[in-house]
Image: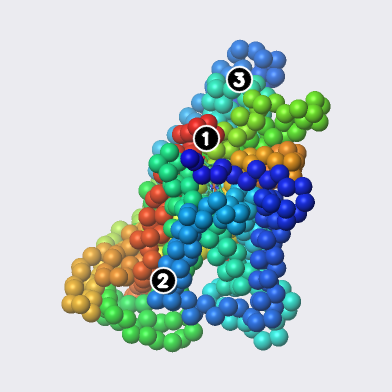
Amino acid sequence: MSWGWHSYLAPLSIILWFLGAFLALRDHKAASLLVLAGALVTLAFIVGLWIRLERPPMRTMGETRLWYSFFLPAAGLLAHRRWRYSWLLAFTALLASVFAIINLARPEMHSRSLMPALQSPFFVPHVTTYMLSYAVLAASAVGSVIQLRHLSATGQPDKGLYDFIDNVVHVGLGFLMLGLITGAAWAKEAWGHYWSWDPKETWALITLAAFLAYLHLRLSPSRETSARLVLMVPPVGLVLLMVTWLGVSLLPAAMGSVHVY
Amino acid sequence: MSPPSSGQAAASRIWGRPWGYPEGLVLAFSALAGGFLAEWLAGPPPLAWLSWPANLFLALGLAVLCALARPLRRRPLARFLTSVPLSVALIAAMGLLALVMGLIPQAPAPYVTPAGAGAGTRLGLDHLTSSWPFAVLYLFLLLSLGATVAVRLSRRRLVFLANHLGLWALLLAGGLGAQDRLRETMLVPEGGLEWRSQRPDGEIVEMPLAIRLDGFDIEEYPAKLAIIDHGTGMPLVADGRAAFLQLDPMEPRGRLLGYDVELLEFLPGAVPAGPEVFVKAIARATVQAARIAATNRETGQRFEGWLSTGESLMPPRPLKLDGGLLMAMSRPEPRRFVSQVKVFTQEGQEIESVIEVNKPLKAGNWLIYQRNYDTEAGRSSSWSGFELVKDPWLPMAQAGLFVWALGSLGLMARGKRGRP
Ligand code: HEM
């Protein structure tokens, strides 16, 4: 399956996700089925592209966006099964659509070449754990915003929602750290050192620091750290994460980064 | 009895006992400010001094200090050092330094202050990893993290221990080991033997091992097609980038700017056989050749002929289109490049092997990496470049990474539940 197929399959996924999000917000049972169908269509395209390119489709920004728009609804569906938050399902489906739309608007030129440094058994786990962590941590940020609104409205936090945010941050941090660790092991194989302060590495560290701060802040609730301030950390973390993923190549500090392509 | 859990900071006045967030933030950021002051007044720290065995002694001293926190764990100072508020303050301060590094381009280490440096440089902002503020905060973080581990050593806290101990070992090996890490480069001509390293500053040093290059091979991807303005010699652009079409025998039809392109024949290794033909060849100096038919989508005019990439003695061959345009093949990208080597170490060891990207060769204390080749010459490059890396602290860093990886798996498996 070449990129040409994307212009037919992506709109199909997007329609399924929009319908799914709409039904989720009305707590309709079919919502998760539709979101699942959209994710499977995207997965089928990823697999087809992988076979067609004879390499994992993880090299270009457009290719990583494909994975993100698969993992987001996947994370949303799993969390929905466990926590029954329909807003989360709707959010992940809509965000996945946004990234599919970006790919439709900016089609990539197809290239089968994969530079030798990227040909490594670490390539797939490195990119997939990062994309998974991005998807899961995005959910924690939305949870925090909802909790903030809840606090403003009622003056009391929603205990279940706190459990959700904290758990999701633990899982997302786990993936984020695995992405970092596989990246370090790979860098040692490819470039001779496991950490070189490459701008993408530096920004991944900044993102890690933000979510680590949240995790530790939540261990010690006290009068001095107002709940509101703590709940702002995941959304800020999400912004930092987006800079790490999408924005690094635009920064002056990124001249010569090995992660810019 | 279990050790004190987190700093339930309830102090109403700053510096009242027990210390909490205000004190933690003040201390972490004072350490930062002190570091910036030292950098401003004294310039970057003399890091070269921190090589073997001085860094080993510092590491041992640090470990002893951390361990001391265990018997002293009921004292207010040890409690504070291992408290959540201080950890948050340190993580925030480190995050802030990383943010500066992520925004301001950093000079490579080892750092030498240029003459007439501006305020940012005098504060260390463009060489943070070799600056006082970073060094001070790094040691503070290691001390707090190590003490936290020492105080909470317990079999019931495996996930906590794996994360914090793994990170501690990694940070220690990565930071304090930095001065012992050597990086050398060698360019070896094909058939030649080399034992000297060329440093970036031009200095030449003798290495404890020699490399003989017995062969060098490149596999290439099919080239890309571009359209070039004959007048300027520049490729035409679309969406701000040079427009290209990847040659792909599996998908012979494509479109490039205003032309329908058809790939009629593709030879990955070819030599010219007359002005209009190429033939398949297995020789050292071959090029990629393709027979292309390009049709102008507006006028329907069709152009057909052989194109080829260039090689040191053969100029690339383009296809002439209309309107002063040429269709040409780009320099192919390498799929793989491999050096066949024999390595001789000072200890008399001889290793015959291949080295390629992502597959370094271990020879004694050194790892040898495939680095580059003569990209102008491409396939007929007559030399291969290697990077030789030695890091005596690597085993500790690897152990740290491994334990930390177990910790992240534990974190995911457990979630927030299961906390005492
Ligand atoms: C790899 C990064 C880190 C991870 C994944 C991590 C994770 C955690 C977790 C999950 C806990 C909860 C304790 C438990 O579950 O038993 C914790 C506690 C703690 N962490 Fe970290 N942490 C990290 C880095 C740090 C750093 C850099 C510090 C700074 C010094 C630190 C200091 C602490 C402290 C003081 C506690 C409180 C322990 C307690 O009161 O029980 N951590 N950390």
Q: Label 1 is found on which chain of the structure?
A: B
Q: Position of residue A49 (x, y in %)?
A: 46, 37
Residue at coordinates 72% horizontally, 29% vertically from top-left?
Answer: A157
Badge 1 local density, few (<14 within 10 Å), some, or many (20+)? few
Q: Is mark 1 within 8 Å of ligand 1?
A: yes
Residue B56, disc: 2
Residue A84, disc: 3
Q: Is A163 left or right of A52, judged from the image as shown?
A: right
Hey, what amino acid is under mark 3?
Answer: Arg
Q: Label 2 is found on which chain of the structure?
A: B
Residue B419, disc: 1
In the displayed structure, would residue B352 be above or below residue B224? below
Foreground mark, 3 or 1, reads 1
Quadrant housing residue A225: top right
Q: CA distance from mark 3 to mark 1?
A: 24 Å
Residue at coordinates 56% horizontally, 42% vertically from top-left?
Answer: B5
Indicate how the structure is coloured in the image.
rainbow
The answer to whether residue B289 shows anywhere in this view is: no
Hey, what amino acid is under mark 2?
Answer: Leu
Q: Is A203 left or right of B176, judged from the image as shown?
A: right
Q: Secondary structure at mark 1?
A: loop
Q: CA distance from mark 2 to mark 3?
A: 53 Å
Q: Label 3 is found on which chain of the structure?
A: A
Q: Is mark 3 within 8 Å of ligand 1?
A: no
Hey, what amino acid is under mark 1?
Answer: Arg
Q: Secondary structure at mark 3?
A: loop
Q: Considering the image in quadrants, where does the C terminus of chain A appear? A: bottom right
Residue at coordinates 66% horizontally, 76% vertically from top-left?
Answer: B39
The answer to whether residue B162 shows anywhere in this view is: yes
Q: Position of residue A85 (x, y in %)?
A: 64, 22
Q: Foreground residue, B72 or A128?
A: B72
Chain-order first, disc 1 or disc 2:
2
